[in-house]
Image: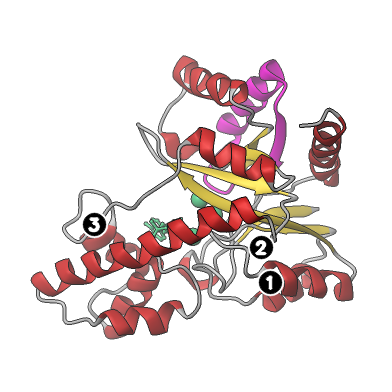
Amino acid sequence: MIDLHIHTTASDGTVSPTGVVRMAKKAGLAAIGVTDHDTVDAIPEFLRECTAAGIEGVPGIEVGVEHEPGIMHLLGYFIDPDSRQLLDLLEIIGRDRVRRMEGIVERLVGLGVKILPEEISVEAGTAPPGRPHVAILLRNRGVVGSIEEAFVRYLREGSPAYQARVKPTVAEAIEVIDGAGGIAVLAHPISLGLEGGELYGVLRDLAEQGLTGVEVYYPTQEQACREELLRIARSLSLAVAGGSDFHGDVKPDFTIGVGRGDLEIPDSVLHELKRRCRSKKEQGR
Ligand code: AMP
Ligand code: ZN
Ligand code: FE
Ligand code: FE
């Protein structure tokens, strides 16, 4: 069993890179992928600990891209964390995340929530600051009772403290992942909010732009959704991926390896992704 979608304290997870490897070892996983939002900072420690634990480690990333409708995230697997092109993009995104956080704080203050930008910096540490860091702070302060409530009342799109941020286009993100020697996979297609012909159409466009795979196994994608995605993947020759989107306390119902209990991702999923990456390299990408 494997889990190819895991966040750490390098982004908005609450467990360190070393911690997630220990949890994966305990869960008996053969391989795991770390996919922090817009950062590769966890990768060196993560790979070291995987080697020490005798688990196969996959270096990855998750990048939000511009898309209407819904939310589109791309996963990049087998990326070189030293890729200049990748680091340049992450630098731009990181700077914009800091700018956007100032806007969120300003709005919260306007809503009567007393919060300082420095408090967000402390919560985020060296991570690119994200809304989950704000949500944790609001919960710890007792402003809200849960992370979910923080998103609903303040942070999600349409709520009063929401602020947009700069996102690369699909083409840019795929090019950068490619340039870093990786393969691009569409994360949790359910977040696009599409089905049937519309979902197929978006995936076909992505495949034409160089997408290699699609995340079929994901906690909130039920069996019928997984089956639909498997059918689409087969007809578009896309590889299949899957993972728990583990974040620790930020998403307490997503458990490493099993998601909400029913994830069971076979090792063959990783074999195929590796094969796709190799064949891309052989074809000069
Ligand atoms: P940001 O990257 O700052 O735009 O924040 C987006 C991240 O917040 C997502 O990738 C999720 O990890 C998390 N998130 C979004 N909505 C929720 C929610 N309702 N509850 C908990 N976490 C959420
Ligand atoms: Zn996250
Ligand atoms: Fe995501
Ligand atoms: Fe994620």
Identified at 53% across, 75% down, the residue is 14
Q: Is residue 8 magenta?
A: no
Q: Nearer the viewer, residue 23 or 55?
A: 55
Q: Is residue 221 magenta?
A: yes
Q: Check whether the beta carbons of the residues at disc 1 and disc 2 lie within 8 A of each other.
A: yes
Could one spot residue 131 in this view of the protein? no
Numbered circle sitting on residue 20? 1
Q: Secondary structure at mark 3?
A: loop
Number of numbered discs visible in the structure rendering: 3
Identified at 44% across, 63% down, the residue is 94
Residue 202 position in % (x across, y down): 49, 23
Could one spot residue 68 in this view of the protein? yes
Residue 169 position in % (x across, y down): 45, 37
Residue labelled 1 has its Cβ within 8 Å of some atom of ligand 4: no
Q: Is residue 90 above or below residue 66?
A: below
Pointer 1: residues within 10 angstroms few (<14), some, or many (20+)?
many
Q: What amino acid is labelled 3 in the image? A: Tyr
Of labels 3 and 2, earlier in sequence is 3
- Alpha-carbon span between mark 3 and mark 1: 30 Å
Q: Secondary structure at mark 1?
A: helix
Can you identify the residue that label 2 sits on? 256
Question: Which one is closest to the eye, mark 1 or mark 2?
Answer: 1
Based on the displayed image, in which of its 4 quarters is residue 15 positioned?
bottom right
For the magenta stretch, what is the residue range? 218-242
Question: Which one is closest to the eye, mark 3 or mark 2?
Answer: 3
Residue 127 position in % (x across, y down): 50, 72
Numbered circle sitting on residue 209? none
- Alpha-carbon span between mark 1 and mark 2: 8 Å
Q: Secondary structure at mark 2?
A: loop
Identified at 74% across, 45% down, the residue is 181
Can you identify the residue that label 3 sits on? 162
Q: Nearer the viewer, residue 76 or 261?
A: 76
